[in-house]
Image (tube, helix red, strand yellow):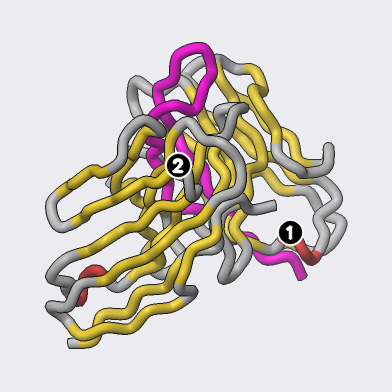
Amino acid sequence: SQQGEEDPQALSIQEGENATMNCSYKTSINNLQWYRQNSGRGLVHLILIRSNEREKHSGRLRVTLDTSKKSSSLLITASRAADTASYFCATMDSNYQLIWGAGTKLIIKP
Amino acid sequence: ETGVTQSPTHLIKTRGQQVTLRCSSQSGHNTVSWYQQALGQGPQFIFQYYREEENGRGNFPPRFSGLQFPNYSSELNVNALELDDSALYLCASSRELAGNSYNEQFFGPGTRLTVL
């Protein structure tokens, strides 16, 4: 079963615009991680936010975490064609295992 | 490039056969996790190995088994293949304390298994 649910399932925007993806989860977590996957290949770790953190930045990425609402968002600013990929959130549960959502497919149009 | 390698890249098997997939973890990493990813879905956790012992298992039947070797590389074995086993199999390595998946996982490129 999958813990996280990403929203939207797919997102298509123009290059240069900002992209926002959301993730909701069901149980308490130790941390939440965002990953990117290109064309069904290996996943690339983007950012990890711990349960006691509310916001984190990494380059053009901004992640927020609201544990009271059991939700997180990933913002990619000034999008580029190379950002086209699927984005997944993964939550670490109380057994210290990663549980994944179904992903958001992001398409950046030139 | 994460330093995690998997072999083979692609594999085609027939129903009922057995398959072994291999993963070499990144240098310095002691934990390997295996995931199954069906087309259009997120990864599903199969199991994790920490210091050569299974350390956590997802909702997969016993015909999915694994090994971790002293050099921390790992194998995933699947017996009696079924059509639904067709998927991308991903391994990820990390450096953990006490077998907890607390840190970033580094993924290999995956093995695409097709069962006919």
Q: Where in the figure is residue B115, as x and y percent of width and height?
A: 74, 65
Q: Nearer the viewer, residue B1 or A31?
A: A31
Q: How many marks?
A: 2
Q: Residue furthest front?
A: A68
Q: Secondary structure at mark 1?
A: helix
Q: Name the front one of labels 1 and 2.
A: 2
To which chain does the residue with label 1 belong? B
Q: Amino acid at mark 1?
A: Asp
Judge from the rendering whether residue B23 lies leftward or rightward of residue A48; answer left or right.
Answer: right
Q: Where in the figure is residue B67, as x and y percent of width and height?
A: 65, 27
x 56%, y 70%: residue: B40
Q: Where in the figure is residue A56, as x and y percent of width and height?
A: 23, 43
Mark 2 neighbour density, 10 Å: few (under 14) some (14–19) many (20 or more): some
Q: Nearer the viewer, residue B103 or A64?
A: A64
Q: Which residue is mark 2?
A: A67
Residue B85 has which mark? 1
- In which quadrant of the rendered view does residue B113 lie? bottom right
Q: Where in the figure is residue A54, as x and y percent of width and height?
A: 30, 40
To which chain does the residue with label 2 belong? A
x 26%, y 61%: residue: A75
Cα separation between marks 1 and 2: 35 Å
Q: Nearer the viewer, residue B11 or A41?
A: A41
x 43%, y 35%: residue: A31
